[in-house]
Amino acid sequence: MNRSLILAVALLCSVGLIATAQEGVGASAVFKNGVDARALGMGGAFVGLADGYSACYWNPAGVAKAAADESIQVGGMNTNLFGAGINYNHAGASFSLMGLAWGLSVSLVSITDIPLADGTMGSSNELLGSFCGAYPLDLGGMKLAVGGAGKYYSHNLLDETATGMGFDAGLLIDGLIPGLMLGAAAYDLGGTKKEWTTGAVDVVDQMFRVGLGFKLSEDFSLAAGADLYAGGDMTLRAGLEFVGIGPLAVRAGAMRPAGTEQFAITVGAGLKLGSLGVDFAWLQNSLIQGEGAGDTIVLSASFSFGGAGE
């Protein structure tokens, strides 16, 4: 394990100590960086577009849009953050049941081979699971959806364990003007406490996302948004998607992590073959420098079935 990787592990295991200053390096902050290669290829500007299998993660209200055709959408993501051995996996689903839209979201971040002072190796595994529901409203041509999610944290670090439960809420507005979608979501409302077996308590600070999506045409969409952290720090995001090349989609975006002035570039592509979708994203590393720390490659796959038209 090289020095850069040890540094990344140390930052990850600091449990959010510098999460608001440098997005993506605290153990709980890593869950706020985003999931799904499609969304991340657009700079993570997805809270106003939130749909598909990752809707429950981005905006609980988004599952109403994802399940509007009564289909079941499932998918997953895998990435090695910064190429530094920080393995991040995500799986999600959205579906309709009893007239309401529901969603599931499970994320796991794991690190193995952490060198300890006694010469042995340790590991860190952190899980975040969410279950969400949403209710759509049709207000005379304008569609509104509200949603909420309960979430559960579990973190195993070396020989200790921390657990905690929190709550997210979301809102989506579509049709205020043609082509415009507005979204807002609040995460870990009031702060989520994680209690360790040692008796220590960590708090996952609440965070807010606001954003918009705008369809210039059926093939071309723009998106922008901001992540608002406790203490006033803010991450800016912007992206675009073009889907007018047969089964192919191309995406690009940019983000400015909180506490920095430097923008990171993102690019992505997708292939849609019937109900199966495969997506790729490349995320420029602007946070961790040094040997062994590089850019991030994200791979996703999704599948939908059982829609009203099938």
Image (tube, helix red, strand yellow):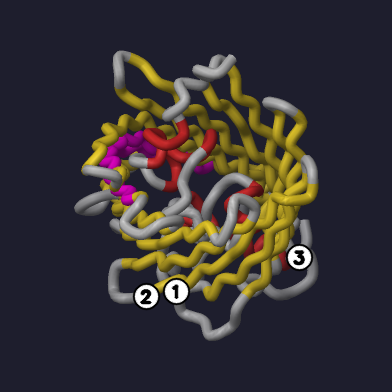
Tag 2 near tag 1, CB within 8 Å: yes
Tag 3 near tag 2, CB within 8 Å: no
Q: Is residue 30 left or right of residue 137?
A: right
- Residue type pointed to by label 1: Ala
Instruction: Estimate the x, y position of residue 96 in percent, counting from the top left.
Output: 40, 20
Magenta residues?
A: 144-173
Q: Which quadrant does the N terminus fall into?
A: bottom right
Residue occupying the point 26% across, 38% down: 138
Mark sitting earlier along the chain (3/2): 2
Compared to residue 4, the image places residue 117 above or below, namely above
Q: Main secondary structure of the magenta part?
A: strand
Task: Mark 1: give few (<14), some (14-19) or many (20+) Cα within 10 Å.
Answer: some
Compared to residue 50, the image places residue 183 above or below, namely below
Of badges 2 and 1, nearer the viewer stands 2
Q: Is residue 69 left or right of residue 10?
A: left
Mark 2–mark 1 distance (CA, rounded to whole Å): 7 Å
Disc 1 element: loop
Per the image, is 169 magenta? yes
The disc placed on residue 233 is 2
- Residue type pointed to by label 2: Asp
- Residue type pointed to by label 3: Gly
Identify residue for label 3: 294
**Viewer-closest of 21 and 136:** 136
Instruction: Estimate the x, y position of residue 183 in percent, counting from the top left.
Output: 36, 55
Mark 3–mark 2 distance (CA, rounded to whole Å): 25 Å
Per the image, is 97 magenta? no
Q: Can the viewer see residue 156? A: no
